[in-house]
Amino acid sequence: MANTKSAKKAARVAVRRTVINSARRSQIRSAIKKVETAVKKGDVKAANEALKAAKPYIQRGVTKGVLKKNTAARKISRLNAAVKKIAVKK
């Protein structure tokens, strides 16, 4: 257990940040699933809209330290490719 005043505060802050980060991670995952679901259904319009909505969540995750930069870039790239693939099929 933390002994000093600053260590106790750091422990409290860590608990608060954990809650916030887990919520942000959940939002990112949900946004990604919406895109993947739309792609699976083959709905180009819904997939484009979901991708447009998901990008800011993923990019914000990088600035907040929830995701690494390359991980976010890879996720966005793969989602983009999936959406383009169904758009070409139609």
Image (tube, helix red, strand yellow):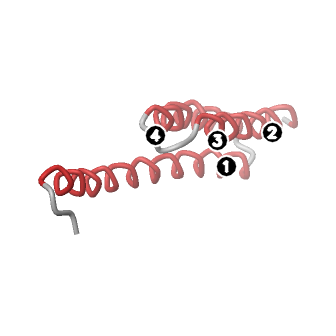
Q: Of marks 4 and 3, which one's residue comes earlier in the chain?
A: 4
Disc 3 from disc 1: Cα separation: 17 Å
Q: Which residue is mark 2?
A: 86
Q: Position of residue 84 (x, y in %)?
A: 79, 32
Tag 3 and tag 2, C-beta contact below 8 Å: no
- Tag on residue 65? 4
Q: Which residue is mark 3?
A: 71
Q: Is residue 3 above or below residue 21?
A: below
The image quadrant where one finds the C terminus is top right
Q: Alpha-carbon neighbours of circle 2 within 10 Å: few (<14), some, or many (≥20)? A: some
Tag 2 and tag 1, C-beta contact below 8 Å: no
- Tag on residue 36? 1
Q: Residue at x 46, y 50 (%)?
A: 25
Badge nearest the viewer, 4 or 2:
4
Q: Of marks 4 and 1, which one's residue comes earlier in the chain?
A: 1
Q: Is residue 68 above or below residue 27?
A: above
Q: Residue at x 50, y 31 (%)?
A: 56
| Residue type pointed to by label 3 | Thr
